[in-house]
Amino acid sequence: MRVLKLIYKNMFRHKLRTSLTVAGIAIAVTSFVLLRTVLTAWYEGVDASAVDRLIVRHSVSFIFPLPYAYKERILKVPGVKDVTFATWFGGVYRDKKQFFARMAVEADNFFDVYSEMLVPSGELETFKKERNSCIIGEQLVERYNLKIGDIVSMDGDIFPGKWDVVVRGIYRPRDKSTDPSNMLFHWQYVDERMKAEWPSRAGLVGWYVVKIDRPDESAAISAEIDKLFANSSAETKTETERAFTLGFLSGASAVITAINMLSFVIIGIILLVLGNTMIMAARERVKEYAVLKTLGFSAHHLVGLIAGESLLIAAVGGGVGLALAFPLVHGFEAALPKGWFPVFEVKAITLILAASGAVVVGALAAIFPIQRALRERIVDALRQVG
Amino acid sequence: MALVSVQNISKSYWRDSLEIPVLSNISFEIPEGEFLGLMGPSGSGKTTLLNLIAGIDRPSGGTITVKDTIVTSLGEGELAKWRARNVGFVFQFYNLLPVLTAYENVELPLLLTKLSKKERRDHVELVLKVVGLADRMDHYPKQLSGGQEQRVAIARAIVTDPAILVADEPTGDLDKSSAEEILRLLERLNEEFKKTIIMVTHDPRAAERAHTIRHLDKGELS
């Protein structure tokens, strides 16, 4: 394109104005990427949900436990392939800022149902045999410098007392969406102590995880399971793992919606910043556009000239913004309590959204200046002074 | 043979519902190689007539033919191409693009041609030499005097070797000696390079350089 040089020179005609516009776009793009990264991190668990797993929880609330005895009855429901369970343990490791999921699980088959957590077979066998052992995610190994054989001491809150477990295995997430920061130990270890110290809390599990043969039958199987326990003292609510995870997020839905809206408001701000710059530029150059038209430059040359400049500014601002986004996201993650978001990374879709948002804004911001440049009659524009 | 034929041209402007006639039924011809001076008081319609001949404005009635082309019947796109090939413009206030050097300003019309970069360079260097600014080609307009800016504008006007050169008050913004330089240059372009020049001017000394002078008054030619 032969007007490229002119586009480039026009862009730097007012260096300060262009620099401020580029900075504005860069800040907006960086903020957009950060907000979208927070959102995607929030939804990471939802995205990682397996379609062939159902969660059975107490119908009133997730915080109410279910009888251990339900397991055998759920197993008998047609279409159910396997059943495991887990209990949220909570507790404090080192101090209250050290957050990661600590769960008491059924050691025998938990890792069969959660096949995305890859545990070396030797380590898994050892874990199954030792009731006071645990398996931790590789992120915890890195974060706390733990190794196999180390004892992890926790102060219980939901389950009061001092709890020690020995690291016997380290799981590796199969993919990026799998939480690499879980700590999983024997439910029996907790249950035995409950039997001794707090008998009314013995024989209870947090929720069941049901592996099914055919995901398209999940609704029917869910209904069948819930029917089993209808009118009992602990009625169940069975739903897909995705729905279950989304349920966790519903509590923060207002915040999530606000972040979501804000991220797109930012795109609007970029449009205003760039639109203002382009309109000012076009107003100043009305006479120059008329001269170009006089010399024989056609409408499509002017469109290329104005849209090219707008897109170039948007692209430079967007590029700077994307480049700044990575250190900012890392800095933000470092500032959060450890383990707040198990997976916190800039997704490709976020980058694509930010880049395409900048390009669309670049194109939109050029519309009014183009209209004005094309609409203005040559003789009227040439008559303008200055 | 006439290069330009103006037949029954009229032009009116509208201000709200009021029609303001500027040119009334004007007809005349300009032979090839002519240096025509258009004179007249302010508001007489001389710039309007110049703009119509140059194809940057449309008449309310009548036809203008340049060589074999009926300019008044061309569409916007065709008219732009026609202007690029056939008309060189010299404005009172030079109208150079401030972000481009003298070389780049002169090169602008050539960007619309199929000439290679080297061919463009040859053309630009040649015309800058003709206007006496070969040594200032890398200067920006703000680094040049008014007279030099106008010479760059003339170089831009002739770089595509157009059939007609239209000049609207080319000395109107210049001091006496710079004006004299510009008029000498226009004279040379007419005599040496056989350019047909139509010049609008208020200045009797500028008009003296023209072969023919036509006066416009209240939209009528004499």
Image (cartoon, rainbow, N blue to C red):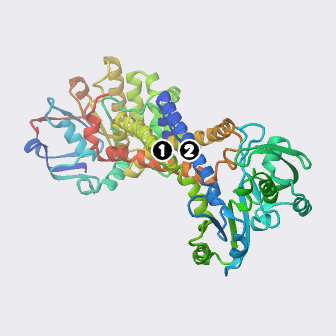
Q: Secondary structure at mark 1?
A: helix
Compared with B19, A121 (above or below) is below
Count all numbered tags in the image, as a single digit. Answer: 2
Q: Report which residue position mark 2 lands on.
A: A35
> Mark 2 near mark 1, Cβ–Cβ under 8 Å?
yes
Left or right of A84 in this view: A372: left
Q: Position of residue A51 (x, y in %)?
A: 64, 69
Image point 36% across, 43% down: which residue?
A369
Q: Disc 2 and disc 1: Cα gap in Å?
A: 8 Å
Between discs 2 and 1, the one toward the N terminus: 2
Towards the viewer: A248 or A278:
A248
- Disc assigned to residue A137: none
Horizontal arrangement in the rendering, residue A101 relative to residue B160 (left or right): right
Badge 1 is on which residue? A262
Q: Position of residue A230 (x, y in %)?
A: 57, 72
Where's residue B61, x and y in %?
14, 52
State the residue in front, A323 or B158.
A323
Which quarter of the picture shows residue A48?
A: bottom right
Query: Does A43 sit above or below residue A150?
Result: below
Q: Judge the density around disc 2: few (<14), some (14-19), many (≥20) Cα neighbours within 10 Å.
A: many
Q: Chain of mark 1?
A: A
Kind of residue at badge 1: Leu
